[in-house]
């Protein structure tokens, strides 16, 4: 009983009819043969896929439909398995009339046909052609992807090698450029400082021009190296507290000689009671100088550049440099911070072409962005760009800097350094040096750059006794023999390099406490780090100024004296 109705017992004949209809309409190819392989029955799916009517299929040998090409299972193997094992599974290919072969998975079995008193073979073929094609495509794609990955790995290795070659080239190029610059800058400084009254005014102006040209070339070399450091995330920072407004005004003063020629006025407007900023003073001077030079470059004569320094919120400074120049197209505003990217055309400028300060290396804004981001800040530009209605829309460069930068500094200082303290230290060092000037400390140069040594000797000879060794081996011998007060060593030396010399000096009892500074034109961050890793106390970059050299040496001497007093 089901829902109150009587269900009749099953009719065997109706069940057979139902099963026959199911077999007929199933989507699996079903073929029944006698033991010799002659087809007795094929369902509608087999008729459709094989493209042969059932009337023609009946009586055909199934062997004529099964291909043994490739990984197909031939009829003889199928027949043997069915006779001996009564079942078989595998994969075969069916030959279809006027169509491509079908690759099918096969399940076959033998059953007894009691009515006919014989065995029959039942074949179930499932078309897997599409699936196999998909698998083949995936495998091909995987092979292609493997090839692409191999190429990418090779390309990455090539790029890494190119990057290393570029770094090595920049290191060598900077050294080779700075070596002659040391002589040009050093000798011109000495002539300007000591021989003005002895030279014709015209000759003296030439010397000044040479000096300025060497400074410009030095800045270009340093800019290229800075971009490399920024790209490699190796820009070194030395923390100290500073007044951002004071730093900005100092940079404006340095540009007065250029801005006054074109009657461009700078206005620096700073909020009251600004907190001090902890950062690298030299790098922030670089930021302001590059931004102000850029504003000056693209501004018309008789215009104004405004500099606003205030607070965005309690924890961040907000600096805006606003000019009245030719503006920056929207499409270029992100590109302006890319290395070597130059914007604007002198043809759009109202000033006479010869007075327009366009051109340059295209590195200034890239360096600004790198320095700001290294301090934990961000920078962007806002400008409408030139149009028919507004010829000089101007540009606004916005900088946001944290008061307390959450970055790792490259300096060992753990406390905030006040500028007043630094000035006091310098005064004490100078006073102490003057008291002991009669002692004439011994300075040992281990350097094969004869021009640089000659300049250094001219700068130092009144206050120091200068010794010179042109190789590392000779330098070690002189260091152990004379025990100098300070040792200056070049990293690039014939034979034994400066790094090894420094390590040896640090490893020996008699020389381990002598102050050592590297005196080199190689100023890549990796080189500087290698110098300090080998045991150096300081690093003096060529070309050098006489003032810097003297101050560095006195600082090293004072550091040694403090260590001795502490002991």
Image (tube, rainbow, N blue to C red):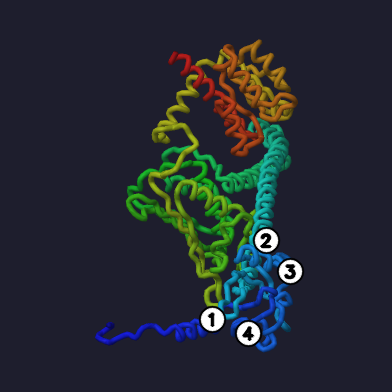
Which badge, 4 or 3, is on the more N-terminal residue? 4
Describe residue 330's horizontal placement relative to residue 400 as left or right: right
Whether residue 204 appears in this view of the structure is: no
Whether residue 153 appears in this view of the structure is: yes
Disc 1 versus disc 4: nearer the observer? 1
Give the label on residue 68, or none: 3
Image quarter of residue 74:
bottom right
Which residue is disc 1 drawn over?
A: 23
Q: Is residue 270 above or below residue 5?
A: above
Q: Is residue 375 above or below residue 448?
A: below
Give the image location of residue 391, x and y in percent: 55, 72
Mark 4 residue element = helix
Q: Is residue 102 above or below residue 83?
A: below
Disc 3 versus disc 1: nearer the observer? 1
Disc 1 versus disc 2: nearer the observer? 1
Q: Residues within 10 Å of mark 2 (few under 14, many from 20)?
A: few
The span from disc 4 to disc 3 (Cα, nearest Å) is 22 Å
The span from disc 1 to disc 2 (Cα, nearest Å) is 43 Å
Which residue is disc 4 drawn over?
A: 48
Image quarter of residue 277:
top left
**Which residue is located at x 70 percent, y 21 percent?**
472
Which residue is disc 2 drawn over?
A: 144
Disc 2 versus disc 3: nearer the observer? 3
The span from disc 2 to disc 4 (Cα, nearest Å) is 37 Å
Q: Are the residues tagged 1 and 4 within 8 Å (C-beta)?
A: no
Which residue ends up furthest to the front in the rendered image? Answer: 117
The span from disc 3 to disc 1 (Cα, nearest Å) is 27 Å
The span from disc 2 to disc 3 (Cα, nearest Å) is 30 Å
Describe residue 554's horizontal placement relative to residue 542 as left or right: left
Which badge, 2 or 4, is on the more N-terminal residue? 4
Q: Are the residues tagged 1 and 2 within 8 Å (C-beta)?
A: no
């Amino acid at each position: 009983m089901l829902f109150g109705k009587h269900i009749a017992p099953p009719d065997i004949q109706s069940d057979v009819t139902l099963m026959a209809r199911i077999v007929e309409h199933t989507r699996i190819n079903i073929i029944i043969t006698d033991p010799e392989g002659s087809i007795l029955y094929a369902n509608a799916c087999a008729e459709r896929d094989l493209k042969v009517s059932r009337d023609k299929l009946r009586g055909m040998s199934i062997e004529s439909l099964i291909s043994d090409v490739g990984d197909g299972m031939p009829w003889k193997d199928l027949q043997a398995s069915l006779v001996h094992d009564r079942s078989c599974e595998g994969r075969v290919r069916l030959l279809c009339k006027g169509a491509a072969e079908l690759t099918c998975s096969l399940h076959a079995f033998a059953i007894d046909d009691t009515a006919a008193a014989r065995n029959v073979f039942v074949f179930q073929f499932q078309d897997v052609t599409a699936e196999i094609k998909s698998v083949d495509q995936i495998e091909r794609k995987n092979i292609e992807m493997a090839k692409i990955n191999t190429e990418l790995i090779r390309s990455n290795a090539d790029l890494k090698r190119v990057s290393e070659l570029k770094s090595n080239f920049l290191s060598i190029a900077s050294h080779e450029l700075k070596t002659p610059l040391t002589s040009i800058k050093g000798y011109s400084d000495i002539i300007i400082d000591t021989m003005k009254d002895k030279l014709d005014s015209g000759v003296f102006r030439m010397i000044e021009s040479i000096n300025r040209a060497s400074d410009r070339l030095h800045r270009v070399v340093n800019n290229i190296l800075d971009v490399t450091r920024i790209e490699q995330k190796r820009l070194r920072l030395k923390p100290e507290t500073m007044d951002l407004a004071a730093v900005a005004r100092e940079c404006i003063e340095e540009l007065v000689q250029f801005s006054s020629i074109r009657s461009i006025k700078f206005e620096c407007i700073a909020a009251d009671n600004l907190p001090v900023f902890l950062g690298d003073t030299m790098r922030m001077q670089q930021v302001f100088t590059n931004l102000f030079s850029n504003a000056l470059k693209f501004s018309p004569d008789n215009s104004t550049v405004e500099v606003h320094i205030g607070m965005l919120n309690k924890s961040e400074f907000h600096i805006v440099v606003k000019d009245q120049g030719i503006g920056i197209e929207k499409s270029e505003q992100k590109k302006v911070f890319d290395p070597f990217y130059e914007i604007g055309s002198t043809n759009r400028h109202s000033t006479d072409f010869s007075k327009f300060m366009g051109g340059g290396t295209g590195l200034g804004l890239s360096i600004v962005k790198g320095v700001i981001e290294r301090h934990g800040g961000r920078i962007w530009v806002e400008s409408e760009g030139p149009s028919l209605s507004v010829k000089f829309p101007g540009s606004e460069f916005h900088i946001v800097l944290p008061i307390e930068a959450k970055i790792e500094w490259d300096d060992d200082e753990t406390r905030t350094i006040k500028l007043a303290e630094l000035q006091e230290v310098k005064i004490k060092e100078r006073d102490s040096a003057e008291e002991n000037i009669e002692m004439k400390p011994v300075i040992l140069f281990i350097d094969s750059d004869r021009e640089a040594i000659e300049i250094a000797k001219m700068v130092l000879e009144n206050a120091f006794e200068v010794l010179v060794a042109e190789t590392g081996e000779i330098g070690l011998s002189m260091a152990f023999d004379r025990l100098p007060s300070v040792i200056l060593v070049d990293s690039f030396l014939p034979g034994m390099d400066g790094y090894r010399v420094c390590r040896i000096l640090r490893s020996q009892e008699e020389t381990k406490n002598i102050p050592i500074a590297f005196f080199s034109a190689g100023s890549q961050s990796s080189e500087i780090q290698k110098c300090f890793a080998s045991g150096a106390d300081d690093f003096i970059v060529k070309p050098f100024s006489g003032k810097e050299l003297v101050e560095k040496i006195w600082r090293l001497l004072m550091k040694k004296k403090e260590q001795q007093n502490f002991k």
